[in-house]
Image (spheres, rainbow, N blue to C red):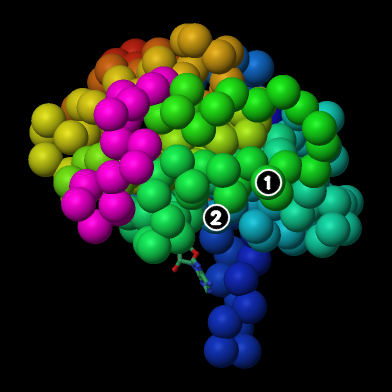
Amino acid sequence: ISTTGLVHIYRAHGHDVAALSGIGISVRPGELVGLLGPSGAGKSTLLQLCGGLLTPSAGRLQVGEHNVATMTDTELDRMRSGDVGIVLQGAGRNLIPYLTPADNIRYAQQAAPDERDLPTPEAILELVGLGNHAATPLSQLTPGQVQLCAVAVGIATLPGLLLADEPTSQLDHHARDEVLAALRTINSETGMTVLLVTHDPEVAATLPRTITIRDGRIASEGRSGEEYAVV
Ligand code: ADP
Ligand code: ADP
């Protein structure tokens, strides 16, 4: 991910809300990066821009080989179903409730635009630690397992980039650590770039690098625990 001067303005009830006021970040291939900041800072907006769910109002946004700011809706659709995985905030929003974990993954894989060699649903579930639950109805999974399943669907097509919005919020510590471990395993075993939104300082402290935004601007960035202020 590489952005310069990235601006996003929401038009709401006849007035403008500047959610991002000129963001410049760079995430290298294979990195695991945390996106931090208080509520309303613009974290979700930045994540959705990177995933092609929103179009920037101004600025440059490069995601892999894609120049996202200038892409058509069709091109964005294709990017989302193959090259960028997104786990939105709120557990299981990318899951079809009446399908098993394996069938949810199969469904996501069918939408992949190109003929690439994809791992089996079972192998994807193994990667996130749900190897024993390929056929378990979603209704019988714990909240932590549902979130792991959401992550598994996000990586079903082995995209180069996984975007996850607060994947550990509303989970107990045990489940939170399992989801974090899954993201770490995905990052280290497949080389997938992972950008993770979190407001949990304990999660942030375990990440190799974090970027903090505040009021739509970069507030600080650096290695966890030694962030420097960006003026
Ligand atoms: P742009 O102006 O192109 O949007 P930034 O202002 O975010 O980009 O700066 C680009 C990079 O330079 C940042 O990712 C950051 O690593 C570094 N940088 C910016 N300001 C500072 C600063 N005050 N001190 C140290 N590094 C900085
Ligand atoms: P965060 O994820 O850091 O909590 P968001 O990106 O959700 O921040 O929001 C950034 C700002 O944009 C906030 O002021 C929020 O109220 C505003 N905002 C977010 N979504 C919309 C929307 N659909 N319409 C209008 N304003 C929005």
**The magenta segment:** 126-141
Between 136 and 7, the residue placed more toward the observer is 136
N-term-proximal mark, 1 vs 2? 2
Question: In the figure, 156 relative to 123: above or below?
Answer: below
Q: Residue at x 50, y 33 (%)?
A: 121
Q: Is mark 2 within 8 Å of ligand 2?
A: yes
Which residue is identified by label 1? 110
Question: Is residue 230 rendered magenta in the image?
Answer: no
Q: Is residue 121 left or right of residue 29?
A: left
Amino acid type of the residue tagged 2 in the rendering: Thr
**32 or 93, which is in the foreground?**
93
Which quadrant would residue 54 be assigned to in this image? bottom right
Which sits in the foreground, 84 or 3? 84
Task: Tell me residue 94's x, y (percent).
Answer: 47, 55
Which residue is depicted at the point 38% across and 22% down?
Answer: 126
Q: Is residue 95 left or right of residue 22?
A: left
**What residue is shown with label 2?**
45
- What x and y, as percent, mark residue 154? 52, 40
On the image, the x and y values in percent for residue 175 come to: 18, 35
For label 2, count other residues whose C-alpha is less than 10 Å away and answer few (under 14), some (14-19) or many (20+).
many
The answer, for residue 40, to whether it is visible in the render is: no
